[in-house]
Image (spheres, coloured by chain):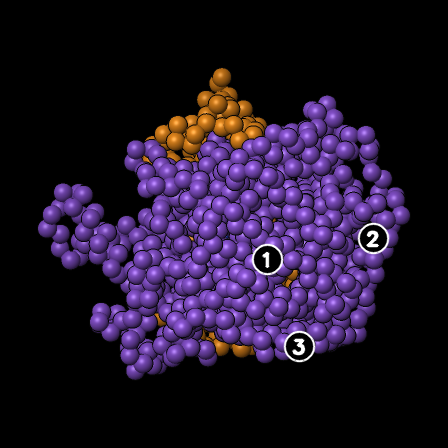
Chain colours: A orange, B purple
Amino acid sequence: MSAAKNINISLQIWRQKDAKQKGKMETYKLNDVSTASSFLEMLDQLNEQLINEKKEPVAFDHDCREGICGMCSLYINGRAHGPDTGITTCQLHMRMFNDGDTIVIEPWRSAAFPVIKDLIVDRTSFDRIQQAGGFVSVNTSGNTIDANATPINKGDADKAFEAAACIGCGACVATCKNGSAMLFVGAKVSQYALLPQGRVEATDRVLNMVRQMDEEGFGNCTNTGACEIECPKGISLENIARMNREFLSASLK
Amino acid sequence: MKLDSKIPEGHISQKWTDYKDHLRLVAPNNRPKIDIIVVGTGLAGASAAASFAEMGYNVKAFCYQDSPRRAHSIAAQGGINAAKNYQNDGDSTFRLFYDTIKGGDYRAREANVHRLAEVSGNIIDQCVAQGVPFARDYGGMLDNRSFGGTQVQRTFYAAGQTGQQLLLGAYSSLSRQIGLGKIDMYNRHEMLELVKVDGKARGIIARNLITGEIERHSAHAVIIATGGYGNVYFLSTNAMGSNVTAGWKIHKQGAYFANPCYVQIHPTCIPVHGTNQSKLTLMSESLRNSGRIWVPKKIEDAQAIRAGKMKPTQIAEEDRDYYLERKYPAFGNLVPRDVASRAGKEVCDAGFGIEANATNEGVYLDFSTEIQSKGKQTAYAKGNHHPTAEEIDSLGKKWLEEKYGNLFTMYQKITDENPYETPMKIYPAVHYTMGGVWVDYNLQSSIPGCFVAGEANFSDHGANRLGASALMQGLADGYFVLPYTVSDYLADDIRTGKISTDLPEFVEAEKNVKETINKFLSNKGSKSVDHFHKLLGHIMWNKVGMGRNEKGLTEAIAEIAALKEEFFKEVYVPGSSDELNPELEKALRVADFIELGQLMAMDALQRKESCGGHFREEYQDAEGETLRDDENFKFVGAWEYKGYDITKEELHKEELNYEFIKIAARNYK
Ligand SMILES: Cc1cc2nc3c(=O)[nH]c(=O)nc-3n(C[C@H](O)[C@H](O)[C@H](O)COP(=O)(O)OP(=O)(O)OC[C@H]3O[C@@H](n4cnc5c(N)ncnc54)[C@H](O)[C@@H]3O)c2cc1C
Ligand code: SF4
Ligand code: FES
């Protein structure tokens, strides 16, 4: 482990008052940032400085700060969630940067994720895709059969879990040159396709989710694989392949 | 007002069934005439909203995040309990009930807890039917593990992401109803006031966090499912936006706030790194199944470790103090959280802490024994009866990775240390709040028509909460309790018709909210909201934290009152009201935290006993264990708001009766 130290950095941050106005990059200097701080703690520190100077703090999305809620975003030095793999922005730490570095921070950029303010974008298109079919149609009546009545092969259960681990952060979309949401949708379709409970309505599910995805203005997948590389949860391209198979067989029905 | 818990008569095992059979119903054709507001879309809120919509009511749901899927329930790691006895280790509804009552240090309501245990099995069935991918064994059956405070394996899990999977299950049910047009979902909306008409909850005032618009929403009943208030301490394992605002607003409108001093301090969190720290990260308690907790036996070794002159792996087995195994042989590393937390604080206070920071607070959670034993086991299972040391090591680490991989990665990302090679450093942190809005057996607050579910209410955990029981409670409330009890309440409303938002009560409530916002934005202060929040957190952690005493609490009450004055005078909130303004959001939340903090200290001061997470230093036995006073404090402390000065709040007591469990000293030795 490297001992924590303090560094001075320069930040270039996208500022945009609201959805309607044009934004631009602004530069800020920030001193005495502990390398043990997280990236978002560094932004807190910047905001504290801006507030003390009676300037408007930078708006950014965050909540759990544990890498699980999917709320934090940020394009850092040209990469979704910054220069580390397998993590979200809240788990990125300042020890990844050096004294004197300039760090460029932008919001997710994709037509389907319009900017709301500064670094915050609107990702409700993901919700609408889910509402189109990302569920099992069972009522919450409590009249379901015993959970162990349907054994599920461990391999399938594990694979379903891996797909279900998607946190809906949108890094896959932000990093894709086509702005495609295939990794996200593929993950959801896969989870249910792999479980017996989800099979019944598998055909409608994939058709509806894909239709909604297209309606939301996401681009097409050209298999560049950038999504998989930047996905903080290691959602694999296999899920896109599985979705394509599901889609094909559903379309043929 | 007298506190009426409305606990039904009859034998504990029949109460809920009999009661349910006699609750009034709303016929299907009448349900579309009724509106329900659900504030919060965590496990409790999402499950409730989905259930009401399925039943045919019109539902409006609110959350402050950009999507209901991001509610803080998503962060729960370890698992969810249910009395299924799949492992054939003697589990039963009664045993889960018993463990939960005992775990809560006999300060929870028997009837509620039994109901929770009764429906627990159903929760698992429901979630599996929804496609929640729980962990399974090779036979295709559900897998279980154990958690602190129990001697059976009843915890269902999905790696270290159980909360995520459960919430995504509830979110998928919610999404289905949104897609069907049965739920209007209001993302990025914050409830800032409750509206009462003729004494009943009839709506809320919410702020659209993107446009800043103040909106009026009416309904026949309002459900508050807004989570816990641990962020009163500033540093906690809660999400940054977690807040008490909804609960506090209804408190000011007449809902009693119960047992605010009961806070769970979780023993296995990553220690604080420095002054800019914004939150603390939990390492799931399930790690205590495999990790052994220790500090050096010799003070010189602890000093050498802190100075960086020695590594933990260099300390010989006989020089390690596995203090939990030593003090509590029956439960060992799996004692309940309050016991483990205090034991950790004790060894650190005595100078054995291993963290090299200002406070030296930290102990080791060591996996080396488990690596050895699981490595050997796996080798044998593969038919290799003479594994080399390297083989054992590698197989053991692989086993750990499968079980806890994401937690280990998370730890490494945050601390820059590899927990497969060196023990984790952990220390207790504020985690869960057992107190909350007082509710009766129907989960109704003392305001008619205002129900409270999940972590936001006080009902099921008593003075301490065992692991894997909050997820269970959230889903029990939302899927299996509220649908019955709220329907019973709404049976009177089938002829009421739409509630107009033009009523004077709505106009008045909206005016008050706008005035508060304008006051903040026009304040001529100079200090940030966080500045005050950190000061509050400091007072709370030092004086209303793991150990409390009369002097500290008395000081805290006065200090927080002074902080409140200074906050309203000195806080500076930039920006305007008609835009996305995170500082304004924080200011509104911190104002409520400050008042609640004061009440927490008052509650802790009046409770002259030690129980569960509430450790009053004056009340301990010769061995330093909690000393309850059942004679005088076997009650729920429910506070009534009396105006600006929080010290004027009045305490009401709901006596707790233990008819079916013999109350005893809690002993984990
Ligand atoms: C790190 C961590 C790990 C945990 N692990 C476990 C575990 O393994 N097992 C277990 O049983 N429990 C665990 N818990 C506890 C458990 O996760 C929580 O108690 C539970 O999820 C709370 O659920 P909830 O529905 O009551 O509230 P939350 O999930 O907190 O939901 C609150 C909701 O209210 C909304 N909200 C809040 N205020 C407002 C407002 N004013 N207006 C509008 N909306 C608002 C939020 O947007 C959110 O939707 C853990 C907790 C943490 C912090
Ligand atoms: S697939 Fe990965 S990158 Fe895309 S939303 Fe899910 S977690 Fe984020
Ligand atoms: S803030 Fe939740 S994932 Fe980053």
User: Residue at image x 18%, y 51%?
Assistant: B376
Q: Quadrant of residue B326?
A: bottom left
Of tags 1 and 2, the one toward the viewer is: 1
Asked if residue B513 lies left or right of residue A184, the reply is right
> According to the image, label 1 marks what residue?
B635
Tell me if mark 1 has few (under 14), some (14-19) or many (20+) residues whose alpha carbon lies within 10 angstroms of its own. Answer: many
Q: Amino acid at mark 3?
A: Glu
Q: Secondary structure at mark 1?
A: strand
Residue extending furthest toward the top: A253
Q: Residue at x 28, y 50 (%)?
A: B399
In the picture, the disc for residue B338 is none
Q: Amino acid at mark 1?
A: Phe
Q: Nearer the viewer, residue B235 or B556?
A: B556
Residue bearing the label numbered 3: B559
Does residue B99 appear in this view?
yes
Q: Give the number of callouts.
A: 3
Secondary structure type for disc 3? helix
Give the CA separation, mark 1 to mark 3.
28 Å
Secondary structure under tag 2 reads: helix
Give coordinates of residue B666: x percent, y percent.
Answer: 43, 59
Which tag, 1 or 3, sits closer to the chain's start? Answer: 3
Q: Position of residue B624 (x, y in %)?
A: 42, 71
